[in-house]
Image (cartoon, rainbow, N blue to C red):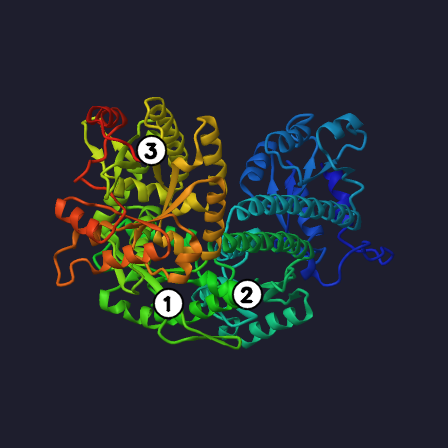
Amino acid sequence: MEDSLKPLEAAVQFSPYDPPLSFAGEEEGGHEEIAPERWRILVVDDEPDVHLATTFALKDEIILDRPLELLHAYSGDEALQMLSREPDIAVVLLDVVMNGSEDGLAVAHAIRHQLNLKELRIVLRTGHPGYAPEYAVIRDYGINDYKTKSELTQIRLQTTLTTAIRSYQQLKTVDANRRGLEMIIEASASLFERRTQESFAAGALAHLIALLGLPHHGLIAIHQPSTPGTRPPHAWLIASAAGKLNALVGQPLAALEDPLVLNAIEHAIRSRSPLYTAEFAVLYLNRPHDQEAAIYLSTQRPLAKDERQLLEVFCTNIAVGLENVALFRQLQDLAYIDPLTYLPNRTQFVTRLDNLLKSAEPDEVVVLLDIAQFSQINDALGHLIGDQLLQSVAQRLRPLVPATATLARLGVDLFGVVGHYQPEQLTPLFEAFERPFAVASHRLRVQISCAAAHLRDTEPTGIGCLKDVTIALNQAKRADNGQLVWYSPSMSRASRRRLDLLHDLESAIHRGQLTIHYQPQIALDSGEIVGVEALARWPQPDGSFIPPDRFIPLAEQSGLILDLGNWLVTQVCGQLSEWRALGLGALRMAINVSMVQFNHEGLIDLLADALQRHSLSASLIEVEITESVAMARPEEVMAKIARLKALGVSVAIDDFGTGFSSLAYLQKLHADRLKIDRAFIRDMGLSENPYSIAEMVINLGHKLGIKVLAEGVESPAQATLLRSLGCDEAQGFLFAKPAPPAPLTHWFLETGLKVAV
């Protein structure tokens, strides 16, 4: 092996003719390509002298701005063991022939295929000039260079190592970039699952620090326009921070105490570009809609060019992610924030109720405030003024609601409050509406209907709770006295019973389970039957009846009154046809018509069709409307009565005396009959002037040429008194109770009573 050492020994002396080493594309200033402090070289040879000569030749050598660190192995096995435990070995100077003829090749094969070291460079050396591996061997064994030891003068050894180290460095950079990009892809996928700005910023900062193995110290500041009633406009806030800066999360960027770092961040923001120093980096993220961001990272070392590129690529993804978070927040605002008042909307309020109801405390109260007649303000002044009024209401209520409570806009003119309140603490909310609201040039006084409930008394869900308080609010609206109505569970039970009754009524109407009873109407002067009033009845399986005063208002409120009215008209016309066949064809049929049915456009056609189908004269039908219906819309009522009379139908004003009809209006109605309310008949003889109201109605009717009928006559004394006052007709238990068609027909025929013609 002595011959193999001579070239290395000779190479210790430098030739003055050897040119200095330089490589195209090298960066000035080694900090741009910072890697480990030393390049680690493994010398593998079974001759100790080769190790000594190599060490001597490379002593104090600097390659690519870094010194060398030589490691030594004297056999293939020792080399593989060392490679398996020592990191970052850049080059292996490997003797081809050691213990066996191909020991070096076996080591090369193991390096590539067992240890899987792809970046490490393998330089084969041999002391036998005549021995040269074939090309296929070099290719298959992943050998990067092959030299005879006689070729390796000091300069050529430096050149060979420089080339190998340069290649190793490039491969490591590529691999680091590949792994960095993989980390970026994985981190981006993870970050895009985050839906809040704070969570996203915290995750992004953690991934940035991990990407380059930086110290756990930095922050992300986000600049965004404010929404009314929140933070000052255009505030830079620290959304996330790590290390010693962690306490600054949520604070303005100006809270950063280090002036050097603060100035650097502000410089990057002003210049809209990144800033790199030997100790830290500041990255600027330009986002649309004036939603910028800046990232400060403590590096404690200069960042290499490839590291900067990785950071900037990742920051591009972070900018996109922040935009997605902003869009998601906008969607959340649309879903949970009322865009007019910037208060929580109904959805968020229900969610808040759900959370509170999980552990409702005794003093947790929900309040509903409904602006009375708000639609009239919109109609009179326009929707713009209406919107401004709602904003003014929200602005006045907001400071009256503590931070622990929630104020929300639940509907067009409905506000809700939920939180810890004692009943007396609610007073300021109501007093807020005692002063007028200044809206544009208007001063608007607003009345409210209000209801409240203790959460413990309501259903255990947000929707159920809101439903319960709405029941109390509806009662407050009906009372129309401005008083607060407190919800009680009995209200829900009554509401459920009402709903059940409504479902049963709808079913009964469609299945024909309702019946009609008829109460005779008598001419007081002759005692003859002049007509009957049709009265709907709802029989039950046990033989009882649900009173009309329970199901008729329900039908009117629900709209079922139209179906009920259509069914009743068809039935009574059929009954009139049957009575005509029995010789009772001159009976007048009085039909009660509700306000809903009276105002419905199809009433005239319904009557005309039913009369034509049964070949009946229109004069047999009398439509009864209450005085309140007659007074509701005077012009429309008069027009509808005129159409009814043109058809040949007569019209009666029911419950007369309970309303406030003017004489002039009553005359214009051209009604055929006034019906004195039973309350006035019942009170006859109980006061000093026993019949003043009844007498007034009778005289009024006669002066207007209108017949008068008294309802609820139950005693002969009442009948005698009415007869003496000149009342034309009467009905009541004195003469006959309402009865089904069959027994009433039998009564007509058995008594032989004549029917007045």
Counting residues from the N terminus, which is met first, the one under dot 1 or under dot 3?
1
Cβ–Cβ under 8 Å for marks 1 and 3: no
Q: Between marks 3 and 2, how big is the CA–CA gap? A: 54 Å
Callout 2 secondary element: loop
Amino acid type, callout 1: Gln
| Label 1 packing within 10 angstroms: few (<14), some (14-19), many (20+) | some
Residue 552 % position (x, y): 31, 41
Q: Residue at x 65, y 42 (%)?
A: 43
Residue 12 % position (x, y): 75, 52
Quarter of the rendering occupied by the N terminus: top right
How many numbered discs?
3
| Label 2 packing within 10 angstroms: few (<14), some (14-19), many (20+) | few
Q: Is residue 494 above or below residue 246?
A: above
Relative to residue 679, is residue 81 drawn left or right? right
Counting residues from the N terminus, which is met first, the one under dot 3 or under dot 2?
2
Does residue 128 appear in this view? Answer: yes
Residue position for label 1: 447
Callout 1 secondary element: loop
Cβ–Cβ under 8 Å for marks 2 and 1: no
Residue 612 % position (x, y): 48, 29
Please tell me which residue lies in front, 595 or 286.
Answer: 595
Residue 153 % position (x, y): 79, 47
Amino acid type, callout 3: Leu
